[in-house]
Image (cartoon, rainbow, N blue to C red):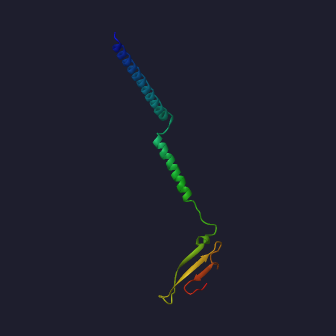
């Protein structure tokens, strides 16, 4: 047997061993993937997509419930608190219009007099 034949045979054996090692590694990875898939399905009562949808549904319901919770102020008149501005019209003269600014402080009670009105057109407060 000459040197070239020995080198060729040795090279072929090396390639064959590398291929066997690669095939074995690939089989181990496939086997592990199958095991993981089987464990996931066997230990679970629901498929993963159903679990995620169920969790999403629960979160959505809790968000809706918290968003729809009654957030009424302690004093119902407080919803009008703030500064309001607009145009005031008169009933006796439909063409007469004046700009006003109304300020209503927090804590006013319905039917009581509180706050400020400023008629900017005639500088009257």
Left or right, 13 with reference to 61: left
Q: The C terminus appears in which quarter of the rendering?
A: bottom right
In the image, farthest residue toward the bottom: 92
- The residue at 56%/83% (across/down) is 120
User: Is 20 left, or right, of 44 in this rendering?
Assistant: left
| Residue 103 rendering spot, x and y as whole percentages | 60, 77
Residue drawn 53% across the image and 56% down it: 64
Q: Residue furthest top?
A: 1
Query: Which quadrant of the figure contains the N terminus?
Result: top left
Closest to the observer, 92 or 36:
36
At a point 43% along the width and 29% down the height, the residue shown is 30
Q: Nearer the viewer, residue 70 or 119?
A: 119
Choose top left, top right, bottom left or bottom right for residue 19.
top left
- Residue at the farthest front position: 3
Between residue 4 and residue 16, name the one nearer to us.
4
Residue 79's spot in the image, x, y percent?
59, 70
Q: Quadrant of residue 77?
A: bottom right
Question: Taking 23 as reference, is 67 left or right?
Answer: right
15, above or below 117, in the image: above
Count of residue discs = 0
Locate residue 59, reporting x and y percent: 53, 50
Vertical comparison of 75 with 46: above or below? below
Residue, x 36% and y 15% (percent of image)? Answer: 9
- Asked if residue 77 lies left or right of residue 96, the reply is right
Is 13 rendered above or below residue 29?
above
Q: Position of residue 83 (x, y in %)?
A: 58, 75
């Amino acid at each position: 047997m000459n040197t070239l034949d020995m080198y060729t045979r040795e090279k072929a054996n090396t390639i064959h061993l590398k291929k066997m090692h690669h095939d074995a590694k690939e089989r181990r990875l496939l086997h592990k993937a199958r095991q993981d898939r089987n464990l996931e399905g066997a230990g679970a009562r629901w498929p993963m997509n159903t679990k995620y949808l169920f969790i999403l549904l629960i979160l959505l319901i809790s968000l809706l419930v918290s968003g729809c919770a009654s957030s009424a102020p302690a004093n119902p008149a407080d919803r009008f608190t703030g500064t309001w501005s607009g145009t005031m019209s008169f009933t006796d003269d439909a063409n007469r219009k004046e700009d006003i600014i109304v300020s209503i402080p927090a804590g006013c009670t319905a039917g009581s007099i509180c706050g400020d009105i400023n008629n900017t057109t005639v500088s009257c407060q």
